[in-house]
Image (cartoon, grey):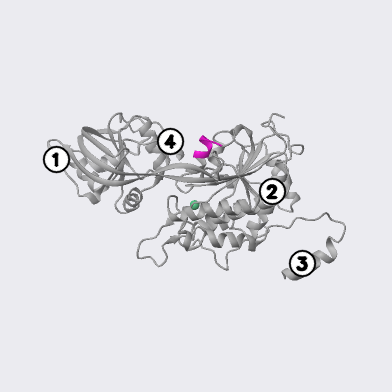
Amino acid sequence: MRFFYGLFFAAIVFSGSAPALAKGVTESELREHIAVLASDEYEGRKPGTEGEAKTVKYIAEQWAKAGLKPAATDGSWFDPVPLMQRGRGNATFVFNAKGRKLRIVSDEIVLIGKNAEYIKNDLPVVFAGIGVTSNGSVEADVKGKLALVLFEADTAPEKFKSPRARREALIAAGAEAVLFIGDSQGNWPTLRRQLLSRPISLESREKRATLEGAISSEFAVALVTAAGLDWDKLRAHAKDADYAGEPLGVDADFAVSTDIYRFNSSNVIGKISGRKKGSGALLFMGHWDHLGICAPEDAPDRICNGAVDNASGIAVLTEVAQRLSKNRHDRDIYFLATTAEESGLLGAYAFADKPVIPLEQIVISLNIDMIAVAGRGAKVAIIGRGTTPLDPLVEGIAKKAGRVIETSTDANDFIQRQDGWALAQKGVPALMVGGAFADLDLMQKFLGSDYHGPGDELTDKTDLGGAAEDADLHIALGRYFADARKYKSAKAGE
Ligand SMILES: [Zn+2]
């Protein structure tokens, strides 16, 4: 099929008349990169591992080959991103309820300190319901206290459905400690596993209570009962729209040690220098990291290889860089491969806090993530649609490339789940453009199956057609937005 197409191409369609047509990005070019990045040798590309070392080395080598120049702060390819992990250490604790001392077996509680040592006596304990009222405010008096919070929060307002948002609201209200109550049938095992998984964080951006963690509902019931209160009544009250919490008449003594591990990960940064100084810059970005060894020891396959998420994006970035570096452009074009996206867009936040160029100079940033889901012919969706004045320009270029536009804003559901969000919050026009998030049924199918599991691997069946087509679209977008005559940006002071 391809062979015939090639003959037809050369002999009839473009003979003589057409300008030398740049070769489009092919599936096999993308496949080559993904095969390396998503191989078991790269161990799932978790920040701080041997897999990271191999990954960032590969990206720098490929970007050099593609014609980029290193553009990190110190002139190398790598901007250090200081990350940390906390693990559970030793803890002793006692809850004092009406003269009774309650101790629990360690399986029923997980305590993680902000600092290596936390010692505190007589910390008052408040039951804070789901943490916030129906208007999102914290009415419980948690200042300088330990807040016990129900993990389950069906009645929470949309913005506070996530435990993270409620935890941060309680911290803002002055809570010294926040412990979630896990439901033993449902979320307790998951909650416990999450807390013990040594999650990666970016210290400079952390909002953390001095002590955090979770207890099982069994223990919460014992605690409340010992305090002379009725658990079922408390739980029922917690659903009230304006619930203001209840002091339990219990206090706690803690001596908690926490394992703290600090390490530097890397954002990889390269650039194509523009010829028109002061005309602004473009930023192409995508995350290189994934989840590493993610399955339990007895699993047949333990590595989350992240072929789609996001070896595919790095492959596309690399091929886009290779095509764009063949010509001079007015504006600088930066390429950024971020770390620790999977831990909460941490590399992107680190870049946003210490960018290699002033953020005001970025006329557009295009993030590329999970690009290999749809096949060729998919519509083009814009994550970030309606948030910048760029939609009609992006659409015009997509149409010129023969693409059909998905005009709904459905893809915006993903806006906070991708690296561009870290820049958008600082006013950078940040979009994600392509087919993968146009067919949301297909995307949901992926999210409900191989996504974030050992099944996200490169196989013969992986369809890279859509990614190749989107790569061509990004090249066209790059050429357009890097041209200071075609795209005059107010941002670039023109
Ligand atoms: Zn992911």
Residue receiving disc 2: 325
Earlier in the chain: of badge 4 and badge 3, it is 3
Residue kind at label 3, given as amino acid type: Gly
Mark 2 / mark 1, whichever is N-terminal: 1
Residue at mark 2 to residue at mark 4: CA–CA distance = 35 Å
Q: Main secondary structure of the magenta part?
A: helix
Gap between marks 1 and 4 measured at Cα: 38 Å
Q: Residue at x 31, y 54 (%)?
A: 185
Q: Is mark 3 within 8 Å of ligand 1?
A: no
Q: What whole-number distance in Å separates the C-alpha atoms at marks 3 and 1?
A: 80 Å
* Position of 31 relative to 322 (above/below): below
Give me the residue at 73% from left, 58% from top.
Answer: 23
- Magenta stretch: includes residue 382: no
Looking at the rendered structure, the number of numbered marks drawn on it comes to 4
* CB-based contact (under 8 Å), mark 4 and mark 3: no
Name the quarter where the C terminus is drawn: top right
> Which circle marks residue 6 in the picture?
3
User: What segment carries the magenta color?
Assistant: 350-355
Of pointers 3 and 2, the one earlier in the residue sequence: 3
Q: Is residue 353 magenta?
A: yes
Please tell me which of labels 3 and 1 falls first in the chain. 3
> Where residue 37 sits in the image (x, y, percent)?
53, 58
What's the CA distance linking mark 4 and mark 3?
54 Å
Q: Residues within 10 Å of mark 2 (few under 14, many from 20)?
A: some
Q: Is residue 320 left or right of residue 214?
A: right
**Label 4 neighbour load within 10 Å: few <14, some 14-19, many 20+:** few
